[in-house]
Image (cartoon, helix red, strand yellow):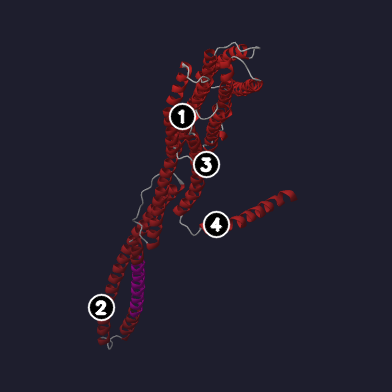
Amino acid sequence: MASVCSDPAGVHGESQDMNSLLSPGMRLMGHFGFARKFQVLFLLFMLPLAGSAWVITKEYSNKLDVISGEQSGVRQLLALDDLNIELAAQRDHAARWKAADILREPTPAAKAAMANVDAGIPRISKALEGVDAALKRENAPADTMTRFKALQAAVTGLDTASLRTVGWWPDGYERFTTVLNLVQALREQIAMDSGLILDPWLETYMLMQLSTQQVPDLIERIGRLSSVGQTSVASGQFSLQSRLQMRDLRGRIDDSKDQMQKAASLLLSKLPEQLQPWADKYAAVKQVLETELKVIDDGVFGGSIKLKPEEFEKSIDTLTGSTAGLRRQSLDALNGRLDYYHETSNMEFIPMAVIFCVLVIMAIYLFACLQSSIRNSASGITTLAESLRDGNLCVEVAVQGRDELAAISRALNVAVVQLRNSLLGVNQETVRVGDAVLTLNAQSSGTLTEVEDQQQQISQIAAAATELAATSQGVARSCEQASESARHTRRIAEQSSQDSQRTTDSIQQLNQRLTETAA
């Protein structure tokens, strides 16, 4: 029993603690009107909602900025790819020219190679202008522009007039190698500045690695093998130095091929359906590498050089062409995949943004309706209360809805009607009482008149009796007694008349007050 009695005390103590905790906020909210409290509540609801919307929008914007930056980098790399192809082709043509130009009078093959070298200069200039335009169009950062200017300065002396004054090894070879190294450095700088190096998706990251690292490295090593081995193939024999160089370059090609195949295998394991054309291209390039490298191995590294220069050049052109095509295909696939992620981001965000906006608009609309409903109901209740305060019972407010405020308004309307009917009933009863008092007053006035008439008759009788006193003392005495009795009756009548008059005045005052109250 004691435990049962202790529970309410504990609950009461918890209630007091809760009230003490909530009292500051309750006092603060007490300064606001009923409708204003809902506005404060709506504001407190909208602030975190707006913050969440800002965070989501900012995250979406950052994601699109990342994708746009990567696409900008891909466009720059595509422009740079054209320059890379022309410079690599120029190096191959120069190596073939130097390998064939062993006589005082150039052979037809040497003349053809020289023509190819000179014809490549306009294409290189055009490709260089294309890279410059792409970098400016994409607002490339300062580091990228610095590397491009270094590349521009290095792309000189690649024509026959300049190369005629130097030997191919090592001066001419180093001149081209330096330029191509600058191209690769610019490629890596673009990938870093555009954010491609930090790409968040596996397939696009692997495509970036293949198009900027593994495939360009393989192409460069094939080009170096061509540049170094062209002279040996043309002469049909190796020097000790050239044999060692060729063996080393051939081993490096295998290393680059293995790196490319590892990256490609990882990409193929997670390959989306949209990248199947790239997979087909890679399979074809892989087959070309196996075939043409076997031709070179059998014809160059089989103990003696069996390949003719034309066959060696054909194999090299096939290798560089197919791998350059794979690099281009990788860049195109990367760009297409970034387009896909851009569209996917839009398709994910736009419906969410539309739904969010619709919900916010609905919330604002419902809040406005709630505000209007509360204001109307509260205004009606206030009007009724003020009318009751002023004594006006003729006011009735319109009631809409089924909420608590509407129930209060309906109850107040009913109470006002009942009070008005009650006061009208009291007024009617007062009127009837007044009529009864007036009737009683009239009857009292008639009685008083009759008494006065009787008194006058008695006075006349008394006068007559006085005259007859001499004749009859007994009659006089009787008359005096009768006169005295009449006076007594008159006094009673006057008192009754006064009492009736006071009653009439009191009822009239009560009637007047009730009438003022009902009005």
Counting residues from the N terminus, which is met first, the one under dot 3 or under dot 2?
A: 3
Rendered-image quadrant of the C terminus: bottom left
4 vs 3, front mark: 3
Disc 1 on helix, strand or loop? helix
Where are the magenta residues, as a range?
487-510
Which one is earlier in the sequence, the residue at label 4 or at label 3? 4
Q: Secondary structure at mark 3?
A: helix
**Mark-to-mark CA distance, 2 and 4:** 87 Å
Q: Residue at x 39, y 56 (%)?
A: 384
Spatial CA span between label 4 and label 3: 61 Å
Neighbour tally class for label 2: few under 14, some 14-19, many 20 plus, Cα within 10 Å: few
Q: Nearer the viewer, residue 222 or 306?
A: 306
Distance between the alpha carbons at the discs numbered 2 and 1:
172 Å
Q: Which residue is mark 1?
A: 161
Q: At label 3, which amino acid type do we have?
A: Asp
Magenta span has 494?
Answer: yes
Query: Can you identify the residue that label 4 sits on?
Result: 26
Residue 298 in the image: state x and y as whole percent: 62, 11
Image x and y of residue 264, in percent: 59, 22
Most foreground residue, 363 or 121: 121
| SS type, badge 2 | helix
